[in-house]
Amino acid sequence: MLAASLLCAGAGAAQSALPAVPAGFVIERIATVNGARELSIAPNGDLFVGTLGNTIVVIPNAETVPGAPRTFATFDDRPVAGVFVTSDAIYAGAQFGVYRMAYRTGDREARGKPERIAAVRTSGGGGHATTTVALSGDLLYASVGSSCNACDEHDPTRATIQTMRPYGKDMHARAVDIRNAIALAVDPADGSVWAGVAGRDDLAHGHPYEIFDDVTAHPGTPDYGWLHCFDDRQPIDGGNCANVVVPRAVFPAYDTPIGAAFYPADPKGKYAFPAAYRGGAFVALHGSWHQPPVPPRVAFVRFNGTAPAKGVDWSNPDAQWSEFLSGCQHPDGSRICRPTGVAVGNDGSLFVSEDEGGAIYRIRPAR
């Protein structure tokens, strides 16, 4: 189905084109939200969508008969790309702040003005402007990208993953020198927080690899080496890389991870994916402008327990993942979609957002 949208004109021929998914699955476009970014599912099946604008949008009943998208909250900040729903609150990540809103399951508009609980990019805008949020246990994580491709940062919140208590207290850097850790995902198996990171440009073609790593597996404040190191501790201009983190999973350069979600190891819903997907991670890869254009897609990383089933192969960045959603890019380089967000529904459905045409897709096993 193609749900009507309050936020975008009706579907035309270009909007009706669908990307491809593996045999045994079906994909539907259930809604259109302009500038759709991160996704988060509520206990009742409502789907929340962060955007490149100043709003968070809700798609009612996304797991059953999706209603028209509607504005849930409006912010004095933009873009409000990050969103994370809990049982009693919704957290949002915007360019200059992390916000909290009281929430009860079934709410389809905010109960009050969003409360800014933490400030980020305190020295101003520029560069990577999106903030992603994730809650694990009693800690809230917020990724804040760098202001540039390669420069010395003077803002202590830039090129970091910050952590704080749910009301913003005790905020501090949990990871540093991490250029743009825009894809944050919590593994429900152990509560670990993984980050998909977009690397820098202007190195040898095909490098650095994009990374996906368990930030919480490293004690203290791990250094991811941005600016002076890349890949498996390779130095740039004599950088000291001895203490730089070596990631647990990689993707090819310029794939640009934007969103990620772990599939439950023991799903209960009627649309549970086959066993081969359980416990693994889906990562939305936005593609890039590099020539030839890197195709947008959604990758699947198979896990064995709480680690990728295959270790990193530094000679082959394709070794650890398979392509799950494809067909976003035509041979001439034109695109019908650029995936940005991923969420797993309570019923086992996989939801994917994209910001080329604002499509929200629902993917299920074929029946």
Image (spheres, rainbow, N blue to C red):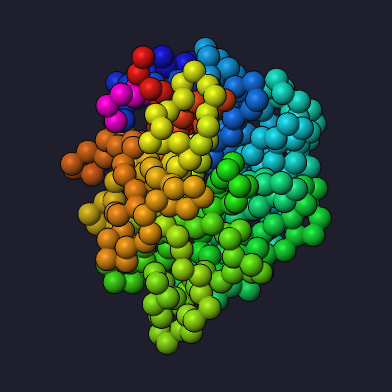
In percent of the image, x 46 and y 29: which residue is there? 350
Q: Position of residue 104 (x, y in %)?
A: 76, 25
Q: Position of residue 75 (x, y in %)?
A: 69, 39
In percent of the image, x 51 and y 64: which residue is there? 179
Q: Position of residue 178 (x, y in %)?
A: 53, 65
Stretch in magenta: 22-27
In the image, taking residue 14 as reference, residue 212 lies left or right, namely: right
Which quadrant holds the N terminus?
Answer: top left
Q: Position of residue 169 (x, y in %)?
A: 81, 55
Which residue appears farthest toward the bottom when viewing the image?
238
In percent of the image, x 61 and y 58: which residue is there? 216
Q: Please state which of residues 223 and 100 is positioned toward the viewer in this rendering.
A: 223
> Where on the picture, by quarter, is residue 72?
top right
Image: 54 above or below 310: above
Which quadrant holds the C terminus?
Answer: top left
> Where on the picture, by quarter, is residue 177?
bottom right
Q: Please state which of residues 360 and 309 is positioned toward the viewer in this rendering.
A: 309
In percent of the image, x 38 and y 22: which residue is there? 365
Does any portion of residue 126 appear in the rendered image? no
